[in-house]
Image (cartoon, rainbow, N blue to C red):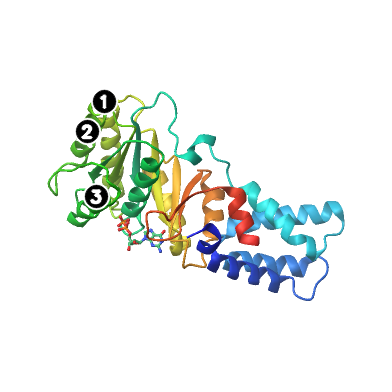
């Protein structure tokens, strides 16, 4: 799906909430700001982020003395765009990997069910399409289904996979995968991990062990730790981001299932709260349904 189609529900609810907030008003006054605050919170933008946006608009009203409600959308767009973080690396849009990092190692983390396996499949598809060789590592050895599903994706996309029997040590799978990726001169290695949040100490331990064994072979690996969050869970996604960022160093985010939900405002809350760039968004179940996140396109889509 296109970004516009994927964000359809979020966009409709977002815009209708905003237009209700300003209904019958020509200038932005306290009442409009109160309504707007309510509208943003109910659009899953989150309280902290909403307050920040409202304060910026208040400051603007105070400075210019007058802000027409017809200008409000434009001001909102600017303030929202300023909350979102620019991509750290301009080349990532074309699925380029940074020079000197071959294989480029991506460790993917996230709770079960958020769309982790699907996102890995979509990433593999995009890297392959960009001419890169890709190797997958099935280090979520806790669930048999996880290995099976990743295998299905590897076949669908046509990329190799390293796996071991269920219940084996995830760090051992990660080690094997990186070793094999180096030996085969792969461009990209994507490693799936188990996402069991019920035991935080265990999660932290497991992820840091996986990182340690990777670094034994490639000192700066993993080059990227990608946290996958389910955007349709709204504020729950924020809570998961809190827990994962406490357990390991997360360098980028993928937010899935934005199609079919009106809770896309959570992207703003996540970006504002964690200062970690949203790199990808999922807007469907197919391999083509991964979009590289561009904050300007995102904001344009929300408001158009
Ligand atoms: P995992 O347990 O985190 O590995 O989750 P999966 O990758 O197996 O995905 C769980 C379900 O969510 C599957 O039915 C996927 O097809 C679906 N899914 C994943 N990403 C998206 C997305 O961006 N949009 C939609 N609509 N469904 C998605």
According to the picture, the residue beneath numbered tag 3 turns out to be: 155
> Count of labels shown?
3
Specify the quadrant that holds the C terminus.
bottom right
Which residue is rendered at x = 34% and y = 40% of the image? 107
In the rendering, at what x and y percent does residue 6 appear? 50, 62
In the rendering, at what x and y percent does residue 244 appear? 38, 47
Q: Which mark is residue 30?
A: none
Of circles 2 and 3, which is in front? Answer: 3
In the rendering, at what x and y percent does residue 292 appear? 49, 47
The span from disc 3 to disc 1 (Cα, nearest Å) is 29 Å
According to the picture, the residue beneath numbered tag 2 turns out to be: 175
Q: Locate residue 182 relative to residue 248 in the image: left or right.
A: left
Judging depth in this view, the residue of 15 and 242 nearest the camera is: 15
Which residue is rendered at x = 38% and y = 37% of the image? 131
User: Which of the marked residues, 3 or 1, is nearer the chain's N terminus?
Assistant: 3
Query: Residue at the right extreme?
Result: 65
Q: Would you say the residues marked 2 and 1 are in contact, meaning their CB atoms lie under 8 Å apart?
A: yes
Up/down of 234 relative to 272, above or below: below
- Density class for disc 2 (Cα within 10 Å; few <14, some 14-19, many ≥20) is many
Is ligand 1 within 8 Å of the beta carbon of the residue shown at mark 2?
Answer: no
User: Which of the marked residues, 2 or 3, is nearer the chain's N terminus?
Assistant: 3
Label 3: which secondary element:
helix
Up/down of 25 relative to 144, above or below: below
According to the picture, the residue beneath numbered tag 1 turns out to be: 216
In the rendering, at what x and y percent does residue 281 appear? 47, 53
- Density class for disc 1 (Cα within 10 Å; few <14, some 14-19, many ≥20) is few
């Amino acid at each position: 799906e296109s970004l516009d189609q994927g964000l359809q529900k979020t966009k409709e609810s977002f815009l209708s909430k905003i237009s209700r907030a300003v209904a019958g008003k020509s200038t932005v006054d306290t009442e409009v700001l109160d309504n707007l605050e309510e509208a943003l919170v109910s659009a899953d933008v989150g309280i902290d982020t909403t307050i920040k946006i409202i304060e910026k608009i208040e400051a603007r009203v105070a400075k210019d003395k007058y802000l027409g409600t017809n200008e409000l959308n434009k001001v909102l767009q600017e303030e929202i765009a300023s909350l979102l973080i620019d991509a750290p690396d301009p080349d990532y849009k074309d699925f380029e990997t940074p020079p000197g990092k071959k294989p480029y190692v991506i460790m993917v983390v996230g709770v079960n069910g958020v769309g982790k396996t699907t996102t890995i499949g979509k990433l593999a598809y995009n890297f392959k399409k960009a001419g890169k060789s890709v190797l997958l590592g099935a280090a979520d050895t806790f669930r048999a289904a996880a290995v099976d599903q990743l295998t299905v994706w590897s076949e669908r996309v046509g990329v190799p996979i390293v796996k071991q029997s269920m219940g084996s040590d995830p760090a051992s799978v990660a080690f094997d995968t990186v070793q094999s990726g180096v030996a085969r001169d792969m461009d990209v290695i994507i490693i799936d991990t188990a996402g069991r949040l019920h035991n935080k100490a265990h999660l932290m331990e497991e992820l840091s062990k996986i990182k340690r064994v990777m670094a034994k072979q490639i000192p700066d690996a993993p080059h990227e730790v990608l946290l996958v969050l389910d955007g349709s869970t709204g504020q729950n996604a924020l809570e998961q981001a809190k827990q994962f960022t406490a357990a390991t160093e997360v360098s980028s985010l993928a937010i899935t299932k934005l199609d079919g939900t009106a809770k896309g405002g959570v992207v703003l809350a996540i970006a504002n709260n964690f200062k970690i760039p949203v790199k990808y968004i999922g807007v469907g179940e197919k391999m083509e349904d991964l979009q590289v996140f561009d904050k300007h396109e995102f904001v344009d889509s929300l408001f158009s």
